[in-house]
Amino acid sequence: MASIASTFNRYNQRQVHVSPALASHRLTGVFTLTRPEEFAATARTILGARLAETPQTLSLY
């Protein structure tokens, strides 16, 4: 999760933050790099992560 969050953050103003508890989890799929919201929603559904949103960030924990 930490690796893909870093990749999303290179391409978007809205940044994805991943908690240390989720950082080493794996999530496999095809995601559009310009749509971090879709990635965050998928992580929330599949991994059972919680999502906190602001206009600038998507925080998964």
Image: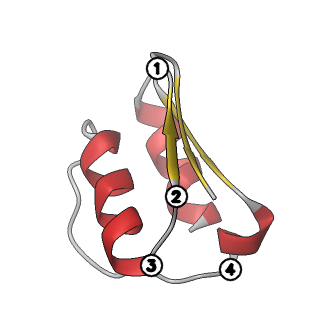
Q: Earlier in the sequence, mark 4 or mark 2?
A: 4
Q: Quadrant of the C terminus?
A: bottom right
Q: Residue at x 45, y 75 (%)?
A: 48
For the residues bearing labels 1 and 4, Cβ distance under 8 angstroms? no
SS at mark 2 in the image: loop
For the residues bearing labels 1 and 3, Cβ distance under 8 angstroms? no
Where is residue 37? Give x, y as percent: 31, 41
Where is residue 13? Give x, y as percent: 46, 20
Where is residue 19? Give x, y as percent: 72, 58
Disc 4 versus disc 2: nearer the observer: 2
> Does residue 10 appear in the picture of this structure?
yes
Number of other residues with Cα within 10 Å of mark 4, as a class: few under 14, some 14 to 19, many 20 or more: few
SS at mark 3 in the image: helix
> Disc 3 to disc 2, how far (Cα)?
9 Å
Number of other residues with Cα within 10 Å of mark 1, as a class: few under 14, some 14 to 19, many 20 or more: few
Residue type (three-letter) at the residue carrying disc 3:
Leu
Residue type (three-letter) at the residue carrying disc 2:
Arg
For the residues bearing labels 3 and 2, Cβ distance under 8 angstroms? no
Where is residue 59? Give x, y as percent: 58, 43
Q: Which residue is mark 2?
A: 50
Q: Which residue is mark 4?
A: 24
Disc 1 versus disc 2: nearer the observer: 2
Disc 4 versus disc 3: nearer the observer: 3
Q: Which residue is mark 3?
A: 47
Q: Which residue is mark 1?
A: 13
